[in-house]
Amino acid sequence: MAECEAVESEIRHVLITGARGVGKTTVLQKACEELEKQGFALHGFYREKVRHFGRGKGYDVVSLNKERAKLSRVDDEGGFLNRHDPNRSGRYLVQVEEFEEFVLPLLHASNTGITVIDEIGKLEAYSRGFHQAVLSRLDDPRSKVFATIPARKGRPIPLVEQVRNRTDVKIFTVTKENRHGILSNVLSVMKKIASEN
C-alpha cells in the first residue's frame, strides 16, 4: 500500500522499505532507541550481517536484549549435496531450525507493546513458522508491528507482498536522499499508533 493511500484511522503497523543497503535497519534501530527512551515497550529482533575478515559470511538475528542466533551462512563448501538443499537461497543456507527456536518466542512474547521485526524478507520466509507468526501478529487487533521489508525487485516474495498489500500498514520508503530526515516522520506515526489502544 502506498504511503498516502492508507487511511490514518486504520493504520496499526509501520513498515520500512527500500533498496538493499540504503539504511532500513539503521532507521528502525534509531526509532526503537527513541521509543524505548520515551517509555514504549518493545520486543523482537534485528537482522545483522556477519563478517569474517571483512567478507560477508551470513546473517544473524539479534534480539533487542542482544542475544543472537544464526539466520543464514554462506555455503563455503558449495558441494553437490548442498546444491539442492530446500533451505538454500543463492549462496546462503538458511538455518531454519535455529532461526525458529530463537525468533518464534520473541514474536509470541507479548500481545502488548511494539513487535519489532527486521526483516520480513526472503531468508526469513523459508520458515513456515515465521510466516504464520508474522501474519498472526499482524492480524491480532492488540498488536502493533514495526518492521522492515525489502523493496520490490525481481520475483515477488509471497509473504512480503501479503504484508505490503495490507490496508492496516503505513509504509515508509528509505532512499539515499531521505534516509537522514525520514526518522522524525517514522517516529511520529509509530508513537501515535503505539499510544492508541
Image (spheres, grey):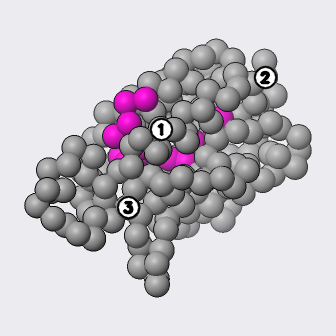
Q: Quadrant of residue 102?
A: top right
Instruction: Judge left or right: residue 8 versus residue 15.
Output: right
In percent of width and height, residue 103 lies at 55, 39
The numbered mark, 2 or 3, whose residue comes first in the sequence reads 3
Alpha carbons under labels 1 and 3: distance apart: 15 Å
Q: Which residue is rendered at x = 48% and y = 54% of the image?
A: 70
Q: CA distance from mark 2 to mark 1?
A: 30 Å
Along the viewing direction, whichever of 90 and 182 lies nearer the viewer? 90
- The answer to which of marks 1 and 3 sits earlier in the sequence is 3
**Quarter of the image that includes the C terminus:** top right
The magenta stretch is 115-129
Q: Within the magenta stretch, is there residue 39?
A: no
Give the crowd class for mark 2: few <14, some 14-19, many >=20 residues within 10 Å: few
Residue 18 visible in the displayed image: no
Q: Amino acid at mark 1?
A: Glu
Upstream in the sequence, badge 2 or badge 1? 1
Left or right, 82 with respect to 14, comes to: left
The image's mark for residue 100 is 1
Residue extending farthest to the right is 38
- Label 1: how many Cα within 10 Å (few below 14, some 14–19, many 20+): some
Residue 137 coordinates in the image, percent (x, y)? 57, 24
What residue type is disc 2 on?
Answer: Glu
